[in-house]
Image (cartoon, rainbow, N blue to C red):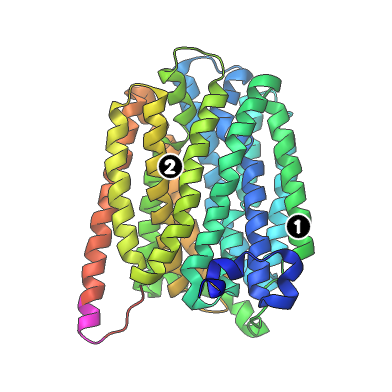
Amino acid sequence: MARHSPWRKATQLPGHISAHLPRWRGSLLLLCIAQALATFGFTLFTPFLPLFVQTLGITDPAQAKLWAGLVSSIYMVGATIATPVWSVLSDRYGRKIMLLRATCTAVLLLGLMGTVVTPWQLLILRLLQGLGAVVNPLVTVLASSMVPREQMGFSLGLIQGSVYVGSTFGPPLGGVVADRWGYRLAAYLGAGALAITSLLVLAGVRDRPDRPLPPPRAAQRSDRRGLRALLSNRALLELALLFMLVRLAQALPQALVPLFVQELSALSERLATVAGGIMSAVALAGALAAVGVGRLADRFGHRRVLLSSSLAAALLGFAQIFVRDNLQFGLLQFGSGFFVAGATLAVNALVADQAQHGHEGADFGVVFGVSFVGWTVGPIIGSAVAATWAIRAVFGISAGLFLLASLWTARSQQRTGRRSDAGGSTSH
C-alpha cells in the first residue's frame, strides 16, 4: 500500500510527472520547490533586520527594539492592505501570474534593501514589500485551488513544510554571510534566490491544472463577494479572527529573537550566526510538523490539532521566560516552532474547507488580510513591551494569547459537536 501513499505520489521527480501523475500533483511538487526557494531567499536577509538597523545609526538599545518592531510591522501593514486585493485579482486573472508578479517585485525590493543608508529608506522598502511582494498567501491560494478536498490537509502541509524547509537553510547561511561579509551581501543573495524562483514558477507551475476556471461572470463577482462572504459565513469569520489571534501570539516576540540572543550572549561576535541557527531550528521543527501534523489533521480533525497545538505552544512560551542561555532558548524555540506550525496548518486547512470553489482567492485573501492584523500589531506591541519592561515579558504575553486561542478552539469544537449531534453537517 505504501506505493499509493500521498507522499510517494506527491514527490515523484519532475521528469516523471506527465507520465505517472495527475497534473495537480506535478504542479504541487514544483510549487513546493518554488515556495522553499522563495522562503530561503527572504530568510537570508530579513530575519536580521533588527541587527541591520544598528549598522544604520541606531545604537541605543531601546531605540533598536522599537525599530525592530517598526521594520517588521510596516511590512505587515502593507500586506494587510494589499493581500486581499491581490488574492481577488488572482481569481480573475490567474493565480500563477499574481505569484510571478510578487516574486519579481521581491527581487527588485530585496536588491534595493542592500543599498539603503538610513533606517527610513529601509522602512519605506519594507512597506513596499508588504504591498507588492507577499508570496506565501498566493502560493497557498494556488495550491488550495488545484488539490482534491480529501487531500487538502496533506497538500497544504507540504506547502507549509516547504516554507519551513526554506527557513531551515536561509537564516544560518544568511547569518554566516552577514557576520563575514555584511548584511548587504545577504540581501543581494536573497534577491538572486527569488529570481530563480520566478523562473521556476514561469516554466513549471500550471494554474489550476485539473479544474476549469470559474465562468468569467463569476470571476468578475469574486471581488465583490470576499468581504460579504466573510461576514455572512460565521464559521469563516470565526476562523479569520482565530487566525488573527494565532498570528498575533506568534508575531509578538518574533522580531526580538536576534536581540534576545544578543542579551543572552556573553560575546558580541557571531550574533547573526547564533540567531540564524536558532531560527533554523524553529524552521526545521515547522517542516517536521507540517508533514506529520497534516496527515494527523486529515485523520483526526483539524480543530483537535489546532486545540492541542495552541495549548502546547502556550506552555512552551511560558517556559521561555526563564531561560538562561541560548541553548535553552534554542531548544524551547524548536518545540514552539513545531506546535505553532501545527496550529497554522490546522487553521489553513479549516479555511480551505470553508472556501467556495472558484473563489478561493477572494475567501483566502480576506481571511489572510484579517490575520495580517495580528502580524502587523504584534511586533509593535512586542517591541514596546520589551523597551518598557523586558523581552521576557513578551514571551509571557505571547503564551497567554496561545492559551486564549486553545480555549476559543475548545469552545468552538463543543459547538460544532452539538450541531453534529443534532444532525447538522460539520467540517473538520
As measured in the structure, the alpha-carbon distance from the residue carrying label 1 to the one carrying label 2 is 30 Å
Give the magenta range: 418-423
Q: Nearer the viewer, residue 255 or 177?
A: 177
Instruction: Please give the name of the residue rendered at 40% of the width and 26% of the height, measured from the top-left corner.
Output: 327
Q: Nearer the viewer, residue 120 or 393?
A: 393
The relative height of residue 170 versus residue 342 in the rendered view (above or below) is above
Q: How far across and down, in percent of the image, does residue 306 sit?
A: 34, 59
The relative height of residue 371 versus residue 48 in the rendered view (above or below) is below
Label 1: few (<14), some or many (≥20) within 10 Å? Answer: some
Task: Check the picture and name the quadrant holding the C terminus.
Answer: bottom left
Which label was assigned to residue 200?
1
Label 2 is placed on what type of residue? Ala
Q: Identify the residue at the far top of this view.
A: 267
Q: Quadrant of residue 199?
A: bottom right
Whether residue 169 is visible: yes
Label 1 is placed on what type of residue? Leu
Residue 269: in magenta span? no
